[in-house]
Image (cartoon, grey):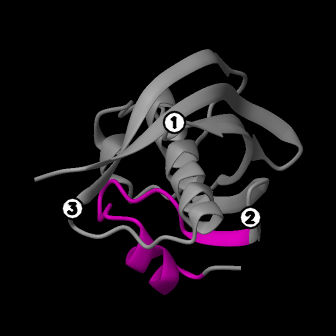
Amino acid sequence: MMDIHEILKKLPHRYPILLVDRVLEVEKGARIKAIKNVTINEPFFNGHFPHRPVMPGVLMLEALAQAAALLAFETLDVVPDDNTVYYFAGIDAARFKRPVEPGDQLTLDVSLLRMKAGIFKFAAKAWVGEELAVEAELMCTMRKIA
């Protein structure tokens, strides 16, 4: 388990792009389960869409990638510093199954498929209750910056 204070120590993201509120479970080298509480106060709801607020699909994928980053850091036993960035390297087979609206709680479920040469591949799904909202295969990499 990881609360918001621990998440803030490990992820460089901050408001309005920090999209993981709590980690419920983490198995090093295997999987992570985390949550994102979706509220009407999210800045993107002002424009997406004013008449029917829906969380953008790319932000659902970003939330999954942030959970994946936390899993990668736990797996490698590293705490990233200001010289480390964690990038998307690819997104495959992304499918959006249900809209995510204010008041929903996204459960982020990410499994590590493989890691090789600094590239991580994950199977990622986000749920609202028992309903699948999005699924994708994510590839991410960590890089040192100057």
- Per the rendering, the mark at residue 117 is 1
In the image, 126 versus 74, the foreground residue is 74
Q: Amino acid at mark 3?
A: Asn
Instruction: Specify which label sits upstream in the sequence, 2 or 3.
Output: 2
> Is residue 91 among the parts visible in the rendering?
yes
Left of 38 or right of it: where is 28? right
Please tell me which residue is depicted at 83% across the width and 50% down the height of the picture. Answer: 129
Question: Residue 94: x, y in percent?
Answer: 62, 18
The answer to whether marks 2 and 3 mark residues whose Cβ atoms lie closer than 8 Å is: no
Left of 85 or right of it: where is 79? right
Q: Amino acid at mark 1?
A: Ala
Please tell me which residue is depicted at 35% across the width and 34% down the height of the picture. Answer: 50
Question: Residue 20: x, y in percent?
Answer: 53, 61
Please tell me which residue is depicted at 74% across the width and 56% down the height of the picture. Answer: 29
Which quarter of the image is occupied by the N terminus? bottom right
Q: Which range of residues does the magenta coloring cover?
A: 3-24
